[in-house]
Image: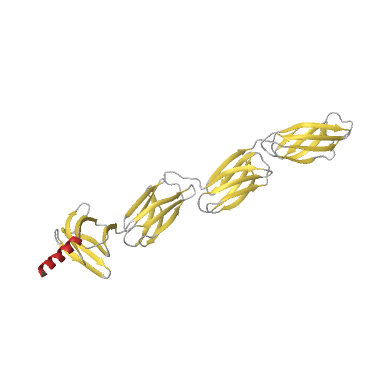
Amino acid sequence: MKRFLTIFILLLFVQNALALSVELGIDEVLVVDNTTVTFDVAENNPNLVFLILESGNESVLKALHFGESISFGVVNYTVGSLDIETLTLRLHILGNYSRIEVVKRKDIDIALLEAFDKYLKVKIRNTGYYEINDTLLISSQGIIIREQGLHLRPGEEVIVKIIPPYNQLIFTLEEAKISKSIVISSLESLVTIDRIWRDDKLHVILKNHGDAVNATVKLLFSGMTIDKKEVVIGTSEQKEIIFEKDVTQGTIVVDYGVITQESFYFEVPMISLVKTVKEGEKLQIWLRNEGDQKFEGKVTVYQNGVIVSEPYYLDVNIPPGEEVSVGFIVPEDAQILTIGLTAQSYSAT
């Protein structure tokens, strides 16, 4: 009965044990629960492998030939084979463990977060097992464009901003000799002109798609700057710029370190004379806006090129599709009169 119990316990242990073959590179760490396994190879004897096992404050360095084993905790490690070209070791593992993974000793992951014409934003993450304390070199076409210290614990990340344009960037850890690259296939505009519209003023809607930026917004007419605004556009902000100019055509130029521009043209109001009624010296005029733009200007009455109306002029505001009536005092004997309409960017008779 005692012998049977002993055999039963032994079989139970073997059944719970896990056997696995793992390939481990010279630059990698094998993690078995709370134990880390790394190796090195003797320079003068490639058949001799130095296996380093660490768990908490316990550490073991063992020189092993192929086929030899070492037990550490409840796990047995057997040296299988070594690819001398790639320095990849095959380890046979047997024992009770719940987690096993192979990770790089030191490694970084590079992710392009934003690619604007103003800047590139890149995330660098420590994906290796050990802390990184190295010099980061950022280069393009063989030229180093930035050099900075990089200190990251495992899992930590940092974001760097780079001024474009570059088609490809290479990120190198100088001491660890690890390089990663990214390709920038296209750049987006950081600031776009979303809309230009007008009433008695000119309104420009700008959209910032990234980080806050300073910008100069210019209003050009016939190639000349007639007004400009210095603005700060917040992160992902939509901002309205208002020019105190009643212009129907021109160009908006936005300079935020990169220049973007958009020309605009608004159709002039189409004012038609509906009818006139003259009774003695009283003249009543009906006007209609047939266009798509609001008319805001002045109405006056001429005879032979001379203003003869009293008052000299009347201010009118005619929305699209609407009609207004204005009245003047004119010479009673006047037979042929001219009605004049003027605005900042429009005139008609």
Vertical relation: 184 (above or below) 160: above
Q: Answer whether residue 44 is visible to the viewer in this image.
A: no
Relative image position of residue 117 (x, y in whole percent): 48, 47
Relative image position of residue 228 (x, y in whole percent): 63, 48
Residue 79 position by quadrant = bottom left
Vertical relation: 23 (above or below) 328: below
Vertical relation: 172 (above or below) 289: below
Q: How is the image coloured?
A: secondary structure
Vertical relation: 324 (above or below) 9: above
Residue 296 position by quadrant = top right
Quarter holding the N terminus is bottom left
Q: Is residue 115 left or right of residue 345?
A: left
Q: Residue at x 10, y 68 (%)?
A: 3
Quarter holding the C terminus is top right
Number of marks: 0
Q: Residue furthest top?
A: 335
Q: Residue furthest front?
A: 1
Residue 82 position by quadrant = bottom left
Relative image position of residue 180 (x, y in whole percent): 35, 51
Q: Is residue 14 left or right of residue 101?
A: left
Relative image position of residue 191 (x, y in whole percent): 53, 47
Q: Answer whether residue 160 is visible to the viewer in this image.
A: yes
Q: Is residue 255 left or right of residue 121?
A: right
Q: Is residue 224 left or right of residue 339?
A: left
| Viewer-side residue, 283 vs 14 | 14
